[in-house]
Image (cartoon, helix red, strand yellow):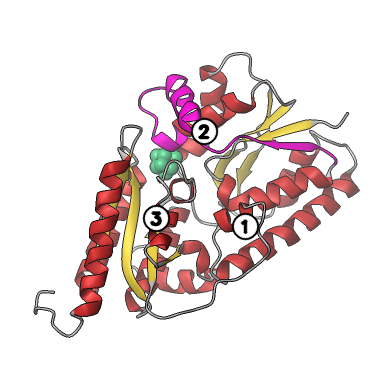
Amino acid sequence: MPIKVGIPRALLFYEYYSLWISFFEELGAEVIVSEKTNKEIIDIGVKNTVDEACLPVKVFHGHVMDLKNRVDYIFIPRIISLTEGEYICPKFCGLPEMIKYSIKDIPKFIDTTINFRKSKKNLNRTVMEIGSYITQDKKKIKRAFEIATEKYNNHRMLMETGLLPNDMLKKDFLGEVPQPSKKDKVLLLGHPYNIYDSYMSMEVIDKLRKHGLRVVTCDNLETDVIDEKAKTLNKKMFWSFGRKILGTTLHAIEDDGVCGIIYMACFGCGLDSVIAEIVERKVRRSSDKPFAMLSLDEHTGEAGINTRIEAFVDMIRWREDHEDNLSTYR
Ligand code: SF4
Protein backbone atom coordinates (compact mmCIF):
# COMPACT_ATOMS: atom_id res chain seq x y z
CA MET A 1 0.00 0.00 0.00
CA PRO A 2 1.53 3.35 -0.96
CA ILE A 3 1.90 6.02 1.72
CA LYS A 4 -0.90 8.56 1.39
CA VAL A 5 0.22 12.19 1.47
CA GLY A 6 -2.44 14.88 1.84
CA ILE A 7 -1.87 18.32 0.34
CA PRO A 8 -4.29 21.07 1.44
CA ARG A 9 -5.65 22.98 -1.57
CA ALA A 10 -4.90 26.31 0.10
CA LEU A 11 -2.19 28.93 0.73
CA LEU A 12 0.83 28.15 -1.47
CA PHE A 13 -0.84 25.18 -3.20
CA TYR A 14 -1.68 27.28 -6.27
CA GLU A 15 1.94 28.37 -6.69
CA TYR A 16 3.65 25.04 -6.08
CA TYR A 17 1.14 22.24 -6.69
CA SER A 18 2.93 20.97 -9.80
CA LEU A 19 6.22 20.65 -7.88
CA TRP A 20 4.75 19.10 -4.74
CA ILE A 21 2.37 16.63 -6.38
CA SER A 22 4.88 15.32 -8.86
CA PHE A 23 7.65 15.06 -6.22
CA PHE A 24 5.57 12.88 -3.90
CA GLU A 25 4.17 10.84 -6.78
CA GLU A 26 7.65 10.19 -8.19
CA LEU A 27 8.64 8.92 -4.74
CA GLY A 28 5.80 6.40 -4.94
CA ALA A 29 3.34 8.11 -2.58
CA GLU A 30 -0.34 8.46 -3.30
CA VAL A 31 -1.16 12.16 -3.27
CA ILE A 32 -4.59 13.27 -2.09
CA VAL A 33 -5.46 16.93 -2.57
CA SER A 34 -8.29 18.32 -0.45
CA GLU A 35 -11.56 19.24 -2.15
CA LYS A 36 -12.03 22.65 -3.73
CA THR A 37 -12.90 25.30 -1.16
CA ASN A 38 -16.62 25.32 -0.41
CA LYS A 39 -18.90 26.64 2.32
CA GLU A 40 -18.39 23.59 4.51
CA ILE A 41 -14.59 23.85 4.33
CA ILE A 42 -14.73 27.56 5.23
CA ASP A 43 -17.18 27.02 8.08
CA ILE A 44 -15.19 24.17 9.61
CA GLY A 45 -11.95 26.13 9.16
CA VAL A 46 -13.39 29.20 10.88
CA LYS A 47 -14.65 27.00 13.73
CA ASN A 48 -11.24 25.40 14.25
CA THR A 49 -9.03 28.49 14.07
CA VAL A 50 -8.34 31.31 16.48
CA ASP A 51 -10.44 34.41 15.72
CA GLU A 52 -7.38 36.59 15.05
CA ALA A 53 -6.24 34.50 12.07
CA CYS A 54 -6.73 35.84 8.55
CA LEU A 55 -9.25 34.21 6.20
CA PRO A 56 -6.66 32.21 4.14
CA VAL A 57 -5.27 30.62 7.33
CA LYS A 58 -8.81 29.74 8.45
CA VAL A 59 -9.50 28.23 5.04
CA PHE A 60 -6.25 26.23 5.31
CA HIS A 61 -7.53 24.75 8.59
CA GLY A 62 -10.72 23.73 6.76
CA HIS A 63 -8.68 21.93 4.10
CA VAL A 64 -6.66 20.10 6.75
CA MET A 65 -9.94 18.96 8.33
CA ASP A 66 -11.03 17.72 4.91
CA LEU A 67 -7.90 15.52 4.65
CA LYS A 68 -7.56 14.50 8.27
CA ASN A 69 -9.12 11.02 8.12
CA ARG A 70 -7.97 10.11 4.63
CA VAL A 71 -4.16 10.25 4.68
CA ASP A 72 -1.03 9.05 6.51
CA TYR A 73 0.74 12.41 6.38
CA ILE A 74 -0.32 15.98 5.72
CA PHE A 75 2.21 18.20 3.98
CA ILE A 76 2.47 21.42 6.00
CA PRO A 77 6.01 22.77 5.58
CA ARG A 78 7.22 25.42 7.99
CA ILE A 79 8.06 28.17 5.50
CA ILE A 80 10.28 31.06 6.57
CA SER A 81 11.66 32.24 3.26
CA LEU A 82 11.37 31.15 -0.37
CA THR A 83 13.85 33.60 -1.87
CA GLU A 84 17.31 34.80 -0.89
CA GLY A 85 17.18 38.02 1.14
CA GLU A 86 13.40 37.93 1.57
CA TYR A 87 10.75 36.69 3.97
CA ILE A 88 7.19 35.60 3.64
CA CYS A 89 4.42 36.25 6.15
CA PRO A 90 5.28 34.87 9.64
CA LYS A 91 1.96 32.98 9.67
CA PHE A 92 3.56 30.41 7.34
CA CYS A 93 6.29 29.78 9.85
CA GLY A 94 3.88 28.99 12.67
CA LEU A 95 1.36 27.07 10.57
CA PRO A 96 2.28 23.49 11.70
CA GLU A 97 2.01 24.54 15.36
CA MET A 98 -1.23 26.42 14.78
CA ILE A 99 -2.78 23.34 13.18
CA LYS A 100 -1.38 21.00 15.86
CA TYR A 101 -2.95 22.97 18.69
CA SER A 102 -6.24 23.74 16.92
CA ILE A 103 -7.20 20.38 15.43
CA LYS A 104 -7.44 17.15 17.43
CA ASP A 105 -6.56 13.63 16.22
CA ILE A 106 -4.59 14.86 13.30
CA PRO A 107 -2.28 12.58 11.21
CA LYS A 108 1.48 13.16 11.26
CA PHE A 109 2.82 16.19 9.41
CA ILE A 110 5.60 16.58 6.90
CA ASP A 111 6.66 19.85 8.48
CA THR A 112 10.20 20.38 7.19
CA THR A 113 11.50 23.93 7.54
CA ILE A 114 11.99 25.80 4.26
CA ASN A 115 14.30 28.73 4.70
CA PHE A 116 16.21 30.16 1.74
CA ARG A 117 16.68 33.60 3.29
CA LYS A 118 20.48 33.35 3.46
CA SER A 119 21.04 31.12 0.41
CA LYS A 120 19.65 28.12 -1.41
CA LYS A 121 22.64 26.07 -0.15
CA ASN A 122 20.48 23.91 2.05
CA LEU A 123 17.98 23.14 -0.74
CA ASN A 124 19.40 19.63 -1.09
CA ARG A 125 19.09 18.98 2.66
CA THR A 126 15.52 20.28 2.67
CA VAL A 127 14.54 18.06 -0.27
CA MET A 128 16.20 14.99 1.33
CA GLU A 129 14.38 15.62 4.59
CA ILE A 130 10.97 15.89 2.93
CA GLY A 131 11.63 12.83 0.76
CA SER A 132 12.77 10.75 3.74
CA TYR A 133 9.15 10.58 4.98
CA ILE A 134 8.44 8.38 1.95
CA THR A 135 11.71 6.58 1.18
CA GLN A 136 15.30 6.33 2.43
CA ASP A 137 16.62 5.94 -1.12
CA LYS A 138 18.59 9.18 -1.66
CA LYS A 139 19.03 8.61 -5.40
CA LYS A 140 15.29 8.20 -5.79
CA ILE A 141 14.65 11.41 -3.86
CA LYS A 142 17.16 13.30 -6.00
CA ARG A 143 15.63 11.98 -9.24
CA ALA A 144 12.09 12.70 -8.03
CA PHE A 145 13.05 16.28 -7.28
CA GLU A 146 14.67 16.72 -10.71
CA ILE A 147 11.51 15.50 -12.44
CA ALA A 148 9.28 17.64 -10.21
CA THR A 149 11.43 20.72 -10.85
CA GLU A 150 11.15 20.18 -14.60
CA LYS A 151 7.35 19.98 -14.31
CA TYR A 152 7.30 23.09 -12.16
CA ASN A 153 9.46 25.02 -14.64
CA ASN A 154 7.14 24.00 -17.50
CA HIS A 155 4.21 25.15 -15.43
CA ARG A 156 5.87 28.55 -14.85
CA MET A 157 6.64 28.87 -18.57
CA LEU A 158 3.00 28.17 -19.46
CA MET A 159 1.91 30.86 -17.04
CA GLU A 160 4.20 33.33 -18.72
CA THR A 161 2.23 32.70 -21.92
CA GLY A 162 -0.94 33.95 -20.23
CA LEU A 163 -2.40 30.88 -18.49
CA LEU A 164 -3.43 30.88 -14.84
CA PRO A 165 -3.12 27.96 -12.37
CA ASN A 166 -6.90 27.42 -12.47
CA ASP A 167 -6.73 26.87 -16.24
CA MET A 168 -4.07 24.20 -15.84
CA LEU A 169 -5.83 22.52 -12.92
CA LYS A 170 -8.87 21.84 -15.09
CA LYS A 171 -9.15 18.15 -15.96
CA ASP A 172 -9.90 18.92 -19.62
CA PHE A 173 -6.91 21.26 -20.01
CA LEU A 174 -5.31 20.57 -23.39
CA GLY A 175 -2.54 23.09 -23.25
CA GLU A 176 -4.18 25.88 -25.26
CA VAL A 177 -2.55 29.24 -24.88
CA PRO A 178 -4.75 32.36 -25.09
CA GLN A 179 -3.89 34.52 -28.08
CA PRO A 180 -2.60 38.00 -27.38
CA SER A 181 -5.20 40.56 -28.29
CA LYS A 182 -5.97 44.26 -28.00
CA LYS A 183 -6.23 46.46 -24.92
CA ASP A 184 -8.30 44.06 -22.86
CA LYS A 185 -6.08 43.01 -19.96
CA VAL A 186 -7.10 43.48 -16.35
CA LEU A 187 -4.32 43.04 -13.85
CA LEU A 188 -5.57 41.12 -10.82
CA LEU A 189 -3.31 41.62 -7.82
CA GLY A 190 -3.30 39.90 -4.44
CA HIS A 191 -1.98 36.81 -2.74
CA PRO A 192 -2.23 33.75 -5.01
CA TYR A 193 -4.38 31.92 -2.46
CA ASN A 194 -6.94 34.74 -2.57
CA ILE A 195 -7.15 35.28 -6.29
CA TYR A 196 -6.87 31.69 -7.54
CA ASP A 197 -9.21 30.08 -5.03
CA SER A 198 -12.47 30.42 -6.99
CA TYR A 199 -14.73 30.13 -3.95
CA MET A 200 -12.83 32.66 -1.85
CA SER A 201 -12.46 35.12 -4.70
CA MET A 202 -16.12 34.58 -5.66
CA GLU A 203 -14.94 33.59 -9.13
CA VAL A 204 -13.58 37.00 -9.90
CA ILE A 205 -11.47 35.62 -12.77
CA ASP A 206 -14.44 33.96 -14.49
CA LYS A 207 -16.60 37.01 -13.92
CA LEU A 208 -14.09 39.35 -15.57
CA ARG A 209 -13.60 36.90 -18.44
CA LYS A 210 -17.36 36.81 -19.01
CA HIS A 211 -17.17 40.57 -19.55
CA GLY A 212 -14.72 39.92 -22.38
CA LEU A 213 -11.63 40.90 -20.39
CA ARG A 214 -8.38 38.97 -20.17
CA VAL A 215 -7.14 38.49 -16.62
CA VAL A 216 -3.42 38.68 -15.95
CA THR A 217 -1.62 38.27 -12.65
CA CYS A 218 1.94 38.53 -11.33
CA ASP A 219 2.46 34.94 -12.51
CA ASN A 220 2.08 35.92 -16.16
CA LEU A 221 5.12 38.17 -16.05
CA GLU A 222 8.72 36.95 -16.26
CA THR A 223 10.54 37.05 -12.92
CA ASP A 224 13.36 39.16 -14.40
CA VAL A 225 10.91 41.85 -15.53
CA ILE A 226 9.30 41.98 -12.07
CA ASP A 227 12.70 42.13 -10.37
CA GLU A 228 13.91 44.96 -12.60
CA LYS A 229 10.82 47.03 -11.84
CA ALA A 230 10.94 46.23 -8.12
CA LYS A 231 14.54 47.48 -8.02
CA THR A 232 13.32 50.96 -8.95
CA LEU A 233 11.42 51.28 -5.65
CA ASN A 234 12.85 53.72 -3.13
CA LYS A 235 13.17 50.98 -0.53
CA LYS A 236 13.84 47.28 -0.98
CA MET A 237 10.68 45.25 -0.50
CA PHE A 238 11.74 42.29 1.63
CA TRP A 239 8.38 40.47 1.50
CA SER A 240 8.44 38.12 -1.50
CA PHE A 241 4.78 38.61 -2.45
CA GLY A 242 5.05 42.37 -1.90
CA ARG A 243 7.99 42.56 -4.33
CA LYS A 244 6.10 40.57 -6.97
CA ILE A 245 2.96 42.67 -6.61
CA LEU A 246 4.76 46.02 -6.69
CA GLY A 247 7.08 45.05 -9.57
CA THR A 248 4.08 43.87 -11.59
CA THR A 249 2.14 47.05 -10.79
CA LEU A 250 4.97 49.26 -12.03
CA HIS A 251 5.15 47.25 -15.25
CA ALA A 252 1.36 47.38 -15.74
CA ILE A 253 1.27 51.15 -15.29
CA GLU A 254 3.42 51.44 -18.42
CA ASP A 255 1.70 48.64 -20.33
CA ASP A 256 -0.91 50.12 -22.71
CA GLY A 257 -2.58 46.73 -23.02
CA VAL A 258 -3.62 46.85 -19.37
CA CYS A 259 -6.94 48.66 -19.15
CA GLY A 260 -7.57 48.36 -15.40
CA ILE A 261 -6.14 47.08 -12.12
CA ILE A 262 -7.89 45.27 -9.28
CA TYR A 263 -6.34 44.53 -5.88
CA MET A 264 -8.01 41.71 -3.99
CA ALA A 265 -7.04 42.17 -0.35
CA CYS A 266 -7.76 40.16 2.72
CA PHE A 267 -9.35 41.84 5.71
CA GLY A 268 -6.95 41.74 8.65
CA CYS A 269 -3.82 41.06 6.56
CA GLY A 270 -1.04 43.41 7.65
CA LEU A 271 0.89 42.86 4.45
CA ASP A 272 -2.08 43.68 2.23
CA SER A 273 -2.85 46.83 4.15
CA VAL A 274 0.66 48.18 3.38
CA ILE A 275 1.11 46.86 -0.16
CA ALA A 276 -2.41 47.69 -1.34
CA GLU A 277 -1.98 51.29 -0.18
CA ILE A 278 1.32 51.67 -2.05
CA VAL A 279 -0.17 50.05 -5.17
CA GLU A 280 -3.21 52.33 -5.13
CA ARG A 281 -1.07 55.45 -4.76
CA LYS A 282 1.28 54.41 -7.57
CA VAL A 283 -1.60 53.60 -9.93
CA ARG A 284 -3.52 56.78 -9.20
CA ARG A 285 -0.48 59.04 -9.40
CA SER A 286 1.14 57.59 -12.48
CA SER A 287 -1.72 56.43 -14.68
CA ASP A 288 -5.35 56.98 -15.59
CA LYS A 289 -6.21 53.28 -15.41
CA PRO A 290 -9.33 52.39 -13.43
CA PHE A 291 -8.41 50.86 -10.08
CA ALA A 292 -10.60 48.85 -7.69
CA MET A 293 -9.92 47.44 -4.25
CA LEU A 294 -11.89 44.36 -3.23
CA SER A 295 -11.65 43.17 0.36
CA LEU A 296 -12.39 39.60 1.43
CA ASP A 297 -13.35 38.11 4.75
CA GLU A 298 -15.64 35.28 5.79
CA HIS A 299 -18.63 37.64 5.79
CA THR A 300 -18.06 39.20 2.37
CA GLY A 301 -21.24 38.93 0.30
CA GLU A 302 -21.13 37.99 -3.36
CA ALA A 303 -23.65 40.68 -4.30
CA GLY A 304 -21.26 43.38 -3.07
CA ILE A 305 -18.35 41.94 -5.06
CA ASN A 306 -20.53 41.66 -8.20
CA THR A 307 -21.56 45.29 -7.92
CA ARG A 308 -17.94 46.40 -7.56
CA ILE A 309 -16.87 44.33 -10.56
CA GLU A 310 -19.71 45.66 -12.71
CA ALA A 311 -18.88 49.25 -11.74
CA PHE A 312 -15.21 48.58 -12.55
CA VAL A 313 -16.06 47.13 -15.97
CA ASP A 314 -18.40 50.06 -16.69
CA MET A 315 -15.54 52.42 -15.91
CA ILE A 316 -13.26 50.56 -18.35
CA ARG A 317 -15.91 50.70 -21.08
CA TRP A 318 -16.53 54.38 -20.39
CA ARG A 319 -12.83 55.08 -20.69
CA GLU A 320 -12.68 53.23 -24.01
CA ASP A 321 -15.48 55.41 -25.35
CA HIS A 322 -14.10 58.68 -23.97
CA GLU A 323 -10.37 58.05 -24.22
CA ASP A 324 -9.66 61.45 -25.72
CA ASN A 325 -12.01 63.30 -23.46
CA LEU A 326 -10.53 62.95 -19.95
CA SER A 327 -10.36 65.93 -17.65
CA THR A 328 -6.99 67.25 -16.54
CA TYR A 329 -7.55 65.51 -13.23
CA ARG A 330 -8.68 62.29 -15.00
S1 SF4 B 1 0.12 37.45 4.13
FE1 SF4 B 1 -1.84 38.13 4.98
S2 SF4 B 1 -3.37 36.82 4.07
FE2 SF4 B 1 -1.37 35.81 3.81
S3 SF4 B 1 -1.15 34.46 5.56
FE3 SF4 B 1 -0.17 36.39 6.10
S4 SF4 B 1 -1.76 37.57 7.15
FE4 SF4 B 1 -2.77 35.90 6.04
Q: Residue 106's x, y, as percent?
A: 64, 19
Q: Which residues are magenta?
A: 28-57
Relative image position of residue 82 (x, y in whole percent): 57, 51
Check residue 168 in the rendering and tell me which mark sits there, or answer none: 1
For the N terminus, the image quarter is top right
Quarter of the image with the C terminus is bottom left
Q: Of discs 3 and 1, which sits in the foreground?
A: 3
Establish if 5 lies above or below 186. above
Query: What amino acid type is highlighted by mark number 2?
Result: Phe
Look at the numbered disc 1 and give the secondary structure of its residue: helix
Please, what secondary structure does the residue beneath circle 3 have? helix
Q: Which residue is mark 2?
A: 60
From the viewer's perspective, is 92 left or right of 26?
left
Is residue 237 visible to us here? Answer: no
Closer-to-camera residue (17/303) = 303
Work out whether mark 3 precedes mark 1 in sequence or the reverse, and give the earlier one: 1
The answer to the question of whether label 3 and label 1 lie on touching residues, with beta carbons closer than 8 A, is: no
Which residue sits at x=45%, y=74%?
228
Q: Quadrant location of residue 252?
A: bottom left
